[in-house]
Image (cartoon, rainbow, N blue to C red):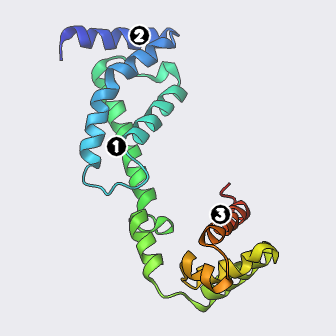
Amino acid sequence: MSNDYQGTITRLLADLKAGNQEALEEIWQACSSELGQLARAVMTNRPKRFTDEEDVLQSVFLSLLQKKKDTFPDNRRDLWRLLLSMTFKRMATHARREMAQKRGGGRTPASLFDEIANRKPTPEDLAILSDTTERELEGLGDELQLREVALLTLDGHKPDEIANQLKMTVRAVQRRLVIIRSKWGKELGEN
């Protein structure tokens, strides 16, 4: 690094201690790129889950904002020691949190979804599904044969098959399916 860079950081640290709040942002701008590269290199081998290097850097910067100005180091070398220490501690904290059993023990969201989707439903799962389905079907009422269209759709019938069975047009079945999706979407909080 050049002497100008070293002098700039030392000057900014002195300005910060003198009360210039903008100096901290300038220090961060000068150092964050290299810290980001370091964090990215260290975190590359970890599975991508919920935290990346940007999250770690934000955490470090927020800690710097809360730090008392008179406790900042006096020179660039000591500043880098502080920043590196804070960054490594944040990376370790995030890694521990992500690997915790409560968060799936390091499994990715996709693997958790696959595990849930591929497992055999328990009797409790089936009871919840049955209750939810019955409640949703009751919410459709008897108007426009919505309940019948929904039941046949849940049984795997296609719109043309439903139209033949209920003696209506395919377009009428499709309109009813739109109404059903709309009602169920509102019930489930999707609209």
Image quadrant in which the N terminus is located: top left
Image quadrant in which the C terminus is located: bottom right
Q: Nearer the viewer, mark 3 or mark 1?
A: 3
What x and y, as percent, mark residue 119? 46, 84
Q: Which mark is residue 88?
A: 1
Mark 3 and mark 1: span between their CA atoms?
52 Å
Amino acid under disc 1: Phe
Provide the secondary structure element on which disc 1 rests. Answer: helix
Mark 2 and mark 3: span between their CA atoms?
66 Å
Kindly give the residue lying farthest to the right in the view shown.
142
Q: Nearer the viewer, residue 40 or 84?
A: 40
- Taking the image as shown, residue 77 lies to the left or right of residue 119, namely left
Amino acid under disc 2: Ala
Q: Which residue position holds label 2?
A: 14
Provide the secondary structure element on which disc 3 rests. Answer: helix
**Residue in the image at 41% along x and 44% along y:** 90
